[in-house]
Amino acid sequence: MKRIGTAVRILALFGLPLLICPFAPAQSLHMPPHQKFVMRNGLTVLLLEKRGVPLIDIFAMVKTGAAADPVGQEGLAAVTAALLRKGTKARTAQQFAADLDYIGGSFEADASTEFTGISAEFLTKDLAHGLDLFSDALLHPAFPQKETDKILAQSLDGIKAAKDEPQSVLMLYYDGYLYGAHPYGLPPDGDELSLQHIQREAIAKFYEANYAPGNTIIAIAGEFDAAELRKKVEEIFGAWPSRTVTSVVVPTAAPAKGKRLLLIDKPDATQTYFAFGNIGTTVNDPDRFAIRVVNTIFGGRFTSELNEALRVESGYTYGISSRFDSRKAPGPFGIYSFTKNETTTPAIDLALQVLQKLHTDGVTAAQLDSAKSYIKGQFPPSIETSGQLARRIVTDEFYGLNDDEVNQLEVRVDAVTPEIARQVIQKHFPMDNLVFVLIGKASAIRPAVKKYADKVDERSISDPGFWPPPAAAQK
Amino acid sequence: MNRFRLHYVLALLLCVSGIGVPVVRGQSQEFPVSTRTLKNGMKVLVQPDHSIPNVALYIFYRIGSRNEHPGTTGLSHFFEHMMFNGAKKYGPGDLDKVMEANGGSNNAYTTQNVTVYQDWFPRSAMSLIYDIEADRIRDLTFDPKKIASEREVVASERRLSVDNNNFGLLDEQLWATAFIAHTYQWPVIGWMSDIEHWTMEDLKHHFEMGYSPSNATMVVVGDVSPEEIFQLCEKYIEPIPSHSPPPPVTTIEPEQLGERRLVVHKPAELPILMIGYHIPKTDNPDYYALNIMRSVLFTGESSRMYQRLVDKDQLALDVSSQAEPAFDPTIAIITAQPRQGVDPQACEKAIYEELDKLKSAPISDKELEKAKNTRLVEFYREMQTINGRANTIGTYEVFMGDYNKLLDAAKSYSAVTKEDVQRVARKYFDPNNRTVATLLPENDEKAKQ
């Protein structure tokens, strides 16, 4: 039983990335040097040598994700990724698993909204074998019908299993209710109906259309000799034929106006899981450092104002946090927590008061100093391993950011003043326009929670899909 | 530890893989550890690593839910929360505020066996952290108001990890059925009625019982030198007097003489199956063979159970095994989530068939080699962060009696033979030695009534 003290862990609990504070600490911390080259077929490669343990990590990003799923076939990008290792031109799924497990290696692939991420890890001594497996899956998947059927059926049951744990689906409902039919509102892993409409042909087509060297960034980090590795990489991935890819441009969604609330009924719940907020901002927002600092104070750590009020002072919940899930286009901002049925409205009321107080009182100089120290002090372990570094350099490349995100962090964080914080609060933290999603026992909480919104929608957690209700379910 | 949270496993879980792993090239040179035992009996282990300007500090107290009694179950875990709620110098709320304002963060976890406190901080905060730790070990205070609100926090934690989590719920029932005598039978978080009723006196008694420096081991890994840590310990920790450790847990779980079965009916989309087998405590020679056996069965998509249940027969969404480090004989748990429409008994049957194969014929050379390779990579995964190292070194020290067993682990694992694997499969995975727990979905209509 963890104390799950810090907000970092609360986020982990909600399935969010652990890295909430991508800012650098003291001057001593810098991104390790790494090289970048673009191959003739358009593939971007990043190599980062790191000593310590004899491990090598690869992270490849295909710059197309679930946002490209056709309507009614949500989950297509995710299923395509899951099938990469399930049979290639050279290996059956079983052979791939046997070869990978024999070296103790790992291989994972999944699609998030904006991109598909494929990662692998193995010992330095197995570099050749590891690269062979990785490139085999990425370049030569065969999508056997039998394996496709299995993955689709397992994914469908995976959605059902997730619905048995409200906290693991809260954000799917929240993003759906916040964005509606906008690509950021669609469930990246699909739903009970969409998965039934995905055919092998569509998967193969999705792969052909999007998995191309010009649409991919690969980083390799760990204990190796970069000059030697570069040769190997050029040899292996140079054979990947270039293809033209139509890139997906996600439109900017306008923040919600007014107040609306979605109640998801889970009749046996003894605890209400809630999320509220509005559409937030982009990864590249010039205010991003100030937003991080203010959000650390508001809901990004154990002693945040939200956690002090709802956990430490009142005991309403085990934990509450707020988070900007910033993306290329404005991503969701939300406040996430849970509380027993009886304290549902007292807890939400209190969270709203804390938000109101942020707007009226702003933050103090002492709070700013504390948050700055916290961000800087907690940053180094987020770029400690080869796996973390590989992922970081690829995502920075994808979002058009550079090493200054780390190297200049202290300076940028320290530049945030109470006045800048005030402006950021007014601009980025919603107050009057809010979207609420609650998962809980509707019969117990329905009458009381109606007060939060002018418009209330309701579904049962066992109804297929999330929000909006899948087209087939509406008929 | 997180046997409650199978799906939210954080970084350092030893559950699935068992403790750490072997190593080929000399660990002593690779990961040198300096040790000192303070005059009050606390042992301190230090491993410098200057790759980032940060430090991970762990304190393991040898007290957990196995030291509790009916009526106050969950007290160790509740006490863990109270360790953050005020002492003499750093009053209620101060600890977290001061630590975070200086760039640090913290957490803690409680298991059946130990309560572990974790600090992660930039090296600049080092003496502050020692001041904070010394304050709460020496002079913890109990504010009735804090006890009341923290009780609610823990109740919320229980609702999250057990009452509204089908895996947590079934796991709790499994332990309660597999153990009839030993204190492993109750949940680490405690029964809800106990959470509601323990008293200030219970807390004070728990502190006196479990929190003697001599009952603790400190591990520090990161941007430090052993000398400076030993100096800080001499200044802050050594003056704290020791007292008696917790009374020994003398109850021995009697041998299980026949299969036990239990069923939980609950609204759910999918069923769950858990099977527990009694196995020896961690510090037992069969530990290594058991880990190799579990690796062959459960690790990776080429493992026997995955191939059979998930891939070939498509009976389960996933299948895994857990076994926590333990001071006393414990259980290894096999967990499977049957696919929709699949009778959990079909999963059960397939699992038994795979166990029988293991008992009747030795594993292949390649399987044995694969399991050993897997352990090696897992070891390096744990050792690649200062946090993982602190936890692994401490866990070996506390559960194996000596962190040097890390060095022996290589030898211990390579000494495991195919015959050993077969022998432990036969010895421990016997039908009479198992408890079978099943969660069966009931429909929503029934729940609404």
Image: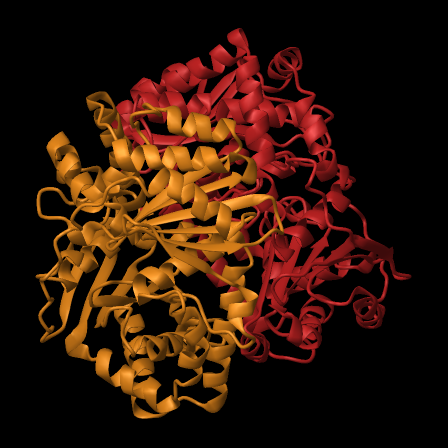
- Which residue is at a point 74% across and 33% down the rendered structure image? A408
Q: Can you give x and y, in whole percent of width and height, for residue B19 in the image?
A: 39, 65
Q: From this viewpoint, which residue is outermost toward the right? A: A40
Vertical comparison of A35 with A54: above or below: above
Q: From this viewpoint, which residue is outermost toward the top? A: A360
Let me know if residue B12 appears in the view: no
Q: Quadrant of residue A238?
A: bottom right
Let me know if residue A57 appears in the view: yes
- Which residue is at a point 49% across and 52% down the rendered structure image? B226
The chain coloured red is A
Q: Can you give x and y, in whole percent of width and height, for residue B98 in the image?
A: 45, 26
Q: Quadrant of residue B402?
A: bottom left
- The residue nearer to you, when weighing A9 against A61, is A9
- Which residue is at a point 35% across and 80% down the rendered structure image? B289
Vertical comparison of B21 with B226: above or below: below
Query: Relative to B310, is A183 on the left or the right?
Result: right
Display colour scheme: by chain
Q: Can you give x and y, in whole percent of width and height, for residue B11 in the image?
A: 47, 52
Q: Chain B colour? A: orange
Q: Quadrant of residue B413?
A: bottom left
- The residue nearer to you, when weighing A51 against A200, is A51
Vertical comparison of B326 with A461: above or below: below
